[in-house]
Amino acid sequence: MMHTAEDTKRDELLRYRSELEKELSDILSYWMKYTPDHANGGFFGSVNNENEPDTTAAKGVVLYSRILWTFSSAYEFTKQQLHLNTAAKAFDYITNHFFDHEYGGVYWSVDAEGKMKDGRKQIYGLAFCIYGLAAYFKASGSEMALRFAKDLYKTIEQYSFDKVNGGYVEAFGRNWKAVDDLRLSEKDDNERKTMNTHLHLVEAYTALFTVWPDEGLKNKVISLLELFDQHFINKETHHLHLFFEDDWKLKSTLESYGHDIEVSWLLQQCAEVIGHQPLTELFKQAAVPIADAAAEGLDADGGLWYEYEPKKNLLIYEKHSWPQAEAMIGFYNAYRLTGNNNYLRQSLHSWDFIKKHIKDHEKGEWFWGVKKDYSVMNKEKAGFWKCPYHNSRACMELLRRI
C-alpha cells in the first residue's frame, strides 16, 4: 500500500499531539515542583531561570488566577487528583488573601506574606479571576467558586461598564474611585479602554456562561464581541487597535502580533460557545485575515516578533514565549477553517521554534523569550506575568482540536 500525503499528515498530527501531551505534563510538573511557597502558603510571586524563588516577591492576582485556571482545566484532561489539589491551593489562597471584603473585587497584589500590597481594582485582574473560578467550579463543583465568580461579574458590571459609550473602563482605586494611572504594566499606554482587558473579559464571561448560562451574561458576551467588530479590529489592516479614550477615540497605532493571533481564534471560539450563529460566522470570516496580519510578524525561523510601531517603523526585536504559544493555536485554527496546509506548517513551525529556543530543556518550563541573537531574555520564569496559562492552554486547545 502506498503511503499518501494524507497518511504523512496524519502521522505528523499524531506526533504533534503526543508531544503536546508530554509538554502539558512537563509544564504542570514544573509548577507543582518549583512554585509552591511552603513557608507563607500559596505560590511564590517570582521564580528565576535557575528555578530559585524570590521569597520576598509580591504575589499578583493574575498569576494566581492563571494557576487556578490551568490546573482546573488540566484536570479535565489528566483526571489526576494532584492537579485538582493544586487548583484548590490557588483557590484557597485567592479567597483568603485577594478578596476585598470591604469594597468588593480582588486586590491587584499582596505581599509575600499575603497582606494587601496594591489594592487597586484592575478589571483585567477581576476578569482572570472569573476565568479561573469558572474552570475550578467545572472541575470541583465548588458552589463557593461559582458564587464568587458571579459576584465578580456583578461588581465589574456595577463599576466598570460604561453606560454611555459601551465597553469597560480599565482600572479604579481600591474603593472604586477614579485613578490617574490606569495602566496594566509600565509598557502600556495610560488610556481608559484597552483591547487587552476587553479580550480577557469576553474570554472570562464566556467561561462563566458555560457553567452559568444566564441570559444577561450571554448578552454581555454578545456586546463584547460586537465591540471587537466595531472598534478593535482594523478593517483595513486586520491588526488590532489597542488603546482608546472613553468615547472610542483611537489613541495608538502599535501592532501586537501575539494579540493578533490570539484574537484570530479566541473570538470565534467565544461566539461558538454561546451558540450565536451570526457572530460565529462573522469571526470565522475574520479569523484568517487576522491570522495573516499576525503572520507579518513571523521571522524565517518560525518565531513571531513581539510588536511593531508603524509610525516609527520600529520592530521590537524580541520573541516572547506567549505569542509563540498563541501562534500554535491561531495558525492551526486557520488551517481547520481553510484546509490550507501552509497554516498547519506554520503551527508546527511555531512549535519547532519553541522546542529549539523557548523551552528550557535542562531546568523546565519556558523562558520569558529570546532576543534577536537568540540569547535568553533575563526575566523571570514564573511570576506576576509569566504564568502557566498561554503554554498550557496551547497544549490543551490543540489536543482538543487534533
Image: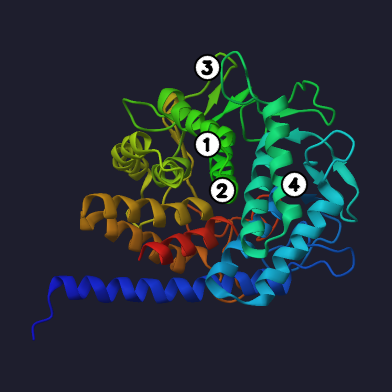
At x 53%, y 19%, the residue is 251
Disc assigned to residue 207: 2
| Residue 266: x %, y % from top left | 45, 45
Task: Give the amino acid type for the residue marked by disc 3 in the picture.
Answer: Trp
Real-space Cα separation, disc 1 to disc 4, in angstroms: 18 Å
Q: Nearer the viewer, residue 101 or 37?
A: 101
Residue position marked by numbered label 1 in the rendering: 218
Q: Amino acid at mark 4?
A: Phe
Q: Amino acid at mark 2?
A: Ala
Disc 4 secondary structure class: helix
Pair 1/2: label in front: 1
**Amino acid of disc 1:** Lys
| Residue labelled with disc 3 | 248
The CA distance from mark 4 to mark 2 is 14 Å
Using a 10 Å C-alpha cutoff, classify the residue at mark 3 as few (fewer than 14 neighbours), some (14 to 19) or many (20 or more).
some
Q: Label 3 to label 2, Cα distance in Å?
A: 26 Å
Residue 298 visible? The answer is yes
Residue contact between numbered discs 3 and 1, judged by CB atoms under 8 Å:
no
Q: From the viewer's perspective, is the residue at label 3 or at label 4 nearer?
A: 4
Q: Disc 3 vs disc 1: which is toward the camera?
A: 1
* Spot occupied by residue 131 in the image (x, y as percentages of width and height): 62, 49
Q: Earlier in the sequence, mark 3 or mark 1?
A: 1
Query: For the view shown, which residue lies furthest in the left direction?
Result: 1
Image height check: is 119 above or below 65? above
Q: Which tag, 4 or 2, sits closer to the chain's start?
A: 4
Q: Looking at the figure, which quarter contains the C terminus?
A: bottom left
Q: Quadrant of residue 345?
A: bottom left
Mark 3 or mark 2: whose residue is earlier in sequence: 2
Disc 1 to disc 2: CB gap under 8 Å: no
Q: Report which residue position mark 4 lands on.
A: 148
Scheme by which the image is coloured: rainbow
Q: Are marks 4 and 2 in contact (CB under 8 Å)?
A: no
